[in-house]
Image: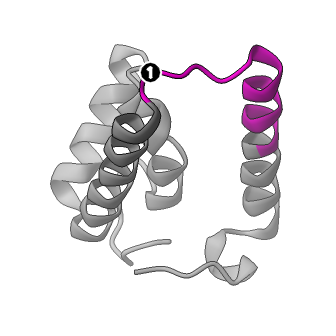
Amino acid sequence: MSCGNHHETPCDEVLARVYTYLDGELDQGGCGEVRQHLDECGPCLREYGLEEAVKKLVNKSCGCESAPTDLRAKVLGRIEEICGEIKASGGAEKTGSAGG
């Protein structure tokens, strides 16, 4: 996804890091980049808000249960694999993903 405007950190890079940002797993510099981009970019801010709502809903529904370590590793590995495929193909627009 891209809003069509130039940003210091591109939209697709910010959206790829949204969950890492929401989980508090980005370093301070990465958090600053994401926050600055979200302050400038309405489409990404809306996407961030959707992802934040999903995370809160999942947490509310299963916040007391922890995923087994091997399942967590498999899911994170698959997410990284898909992000790599999206980057290699030139972005989500070319993979047919629905935007907003």
Residue 89, above or below 82? below
- Magenta-drawn stretch contains 56: no
Residues drawn in magenta: 63-78
Name the foreground residue: 97 vs 53.
Answer: 53
Residue at which label 1 appears = 64
Main SS class of the magenta portion in the image? helix
- Which residue is depicted at the point 33% across and 72% down? 5
Provide residue 35's location: percent of width, then percent of height: 24, 39
Q: Secondary structure at mark 1?
A: loop
Side of 75 where 14 appears, left or right: left
Mark 1 Cα within 10 Å, few/some/many (few <14, many 20+)? few
Residue 14, above or below 46? above
Which image quarter: residue 55? Answer: top left
- Which residue is depicted at the point 43% across and 43% down? 58
- Which residue is depicted at the point 41% across and 48% down? 9
Which image quarter: residue 69? Answer: top right
**Amino acid type of the residue that numbered disc 1 sits on in the rendered structure:** Cys
Side of 41 where 6 appears, left or right: right
Where, quadrant-wise, is the C terminus in this rendering? bottom left
Provide residue 52's location: percent of width, then percent of height: 32, 47
Provide residue 72's location: percent of width, then percent of height: 72, 26
Residue 78, above or below 65? below
- Which residue is depicted at the point 26% across and 65% down? 46
The number of callouts visible is: 1
